[in-house]
Amino acid sequence: MKSFRHRLLLTTLAWIGILLAGLFIVIGQLFSFYVDAEDITTVWVSLASIFIVTIIISAVICNRIIRIHAQPIDNITQVALQLAKGNYRARAYETESLGTAQLSTTINILARNLQEITAVREMEQERLKTLIENMGSALIMIDRQGRISLVNKFFMNEFDLTKDDIQEKFYKEIDIPHVLERFIENIFVTESPARDQLEFTSGLNRKHLDVYGAPVLGEHERWLGIVIVSQDISELKRLEQIRKDFVANVSHELRTPVTSIKGFSETLLDGAYQDEATLLSFLEIIHTESNRLQLLVKDLLDLSKVEQTGFQVDVHPTDMNEVIGRAVEMIKPRVEEKSLHLDVQQEPTTVLGDANRLIQVMMNLLINAITYSAADTTIKIRLYHANGQAVIEVEDEGIGIEASEIGRLFERFYRVARDRSRNSGGTGLGLSIVKHLIEAHHGKVEVESQIGVGTTFTVYLPLWS
């Protein structure tokens, strides 16, 4: 593609050539009337030479003149083409030529404005992308045809999707819960905002979503599609259920001993105290229920303390063998009462922990094992080292735990066999206290169980080195 300057130069030279050619033809014809025939050839050769020289001189002069006036136009044209292609960094030469100075300045101002607008737009797009990707909620945008136009990483993680699963797909083609699909269809049908809490099964878990959907409107109220924002509230639902269970269980656990104490004391006040046998029997019951109430209040206070934010244990180098020995001594009466056998296998081990709290942990684990063990069975306690940690195992041959119940085992007041644990005097708070105390020691506790075979609690604690 020839430049404007080249086209103008060729056009000018063509016109000059035509004019000069015509002029020299006229001059030649005039000379032919006044010169001899022998000299006419010489005249025409001279005229031709003068014509060529004139054309060359004209070309040089025209090129100079045109370069001064037309080259800026060429440059501005090239800059305009670059701007049209999206290269907003292109700039025109700003010359002092009266004809193009204002045009060059204007197109440079236009280029700078376009560059600034583009930079602002890119920054806003980057901010929007960052906001959408890190908003903490799952988001999906669907166009008016039902095709997915935008999805953030939280949505893909929530429903275990990849980019290939959603690229150029319709929302009905991707693997999302049916309840969410129906919610999306409802937004399309009603074309109005809606909010709902959806419940569905994901694998073995029950999940809850708080979902909000709304139509997306463009200029002049043009309907572009819909946007769906969802928040996983499964943990909130679980905590709400735990809170309800906690209130119900505390009420029940407190009501039972209080009712017993109140009932038997009223009976005694009504005259039953006059019968010594009845008096002693009722006082024994009142004393037992008072101990049960005291134990419940103590465990509640302990649990409240260890659940507080910032709770810390007073850690020192602690002989774990001594901790286990003291715990075993304290539960021996209950072991003998139930005709159980203790099998203790331990290596010399020093951990970084709080001795009193670790004794409390071992007591709760052993009492739990005793509670759910049948008579004449064995409770095994093992202490050893593995992977730079102290490992304590408490294994019983009790009733075992269903796999579905293991996840709730450390909840407050949760009991596997409610009647047996309640009759044994347990509060249902021991394992919850164990979990929090072990976590305060920067350790962890795990459970393995098989129905009818038994349960093993495994505690990992940091070694002292």
Image: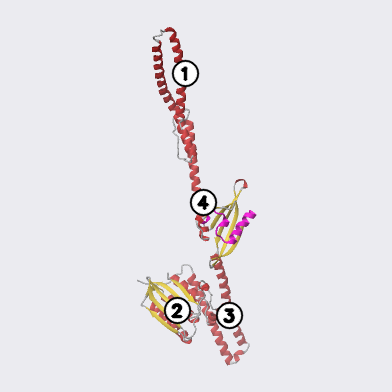
Which of disc 4 and disc 3 is earlier in sequence? 4
Q: Nearer the viewer, residue 34 or 142?
A: 34
Which residue, given by chain and number where applicable, does mark 1 sit on? 19
**Which segment did they paint magenta?**
165-191
Q: Residue at position x 64%, y 55% from top?
A: 189
Mark 3 touching mark 4, by CB under 8 A? no
Which residue, as the protein is rendered here, is positioned at the far right?
Answer: 190
Name the spot of residue 72 as percent of width and height, x first: 45, 31
User: Could you say whether the residue bearing mark 3 is in a helix, strand or loop?
Assistant: helix
Mark 2 touching mark 1, by CB under 8 A? no
Q: Determine crowd level at label 3: few under 14, some 14-19, many 20+ residues with C-alpha closer than 10 A.
A: some
Q: Nearer the viewer, residue 413 or 306?
A: 413
Which color scheme does this rendered protein use? Answer: secondary structure
Name the spot of residue 223 as percent of width and height, x first: 61, 49
Mark 1 touching mark 4, by CB under 8 A? no
**Amino acid type of the residue that numbered disc 4 sits on in the rendered structure:** Leu
Q: Image quadrant of residue 92?
A: top left
**Residue 97 can be seen, yes or no:** no
Which residue, given by chain and number where applicable, does mark 2 sit on? 395
User: Could you say whether the residue bearing mark 4 is in a helix, strand or loop?
Assistant: helix
Which residue, given by chain and number where applicable, does mark 3 sit on? 256
Which of disc 3 and disc 2 is earlier in sequence? 3
Q: Determine crowd level at label 1: few under 14, some 14-19, many 20+ residues with C-alpha closer than 10 A.
A: few
Which residue, given by chain and number where applicable, does mark 4 sit on? 128
Which of disc 1 and disc 2 is earlier in sequence? 1
Q: CA distance from mark 1 to mark 4?
A: 67 Å
Q: CA distance from mark 3 to mark 1?
A: 124 Å
Q: Image quadrant of residue 251?
A: bottom right
Q: CA distance from mark 2 to mark 1?
A: 117 Å
User: Could you say whether the residue bearing mark 1 is in a helix, strand or loop?
Assistant: helix
Q: CA distance from mark 3 to mark 4?
A: 58 Å
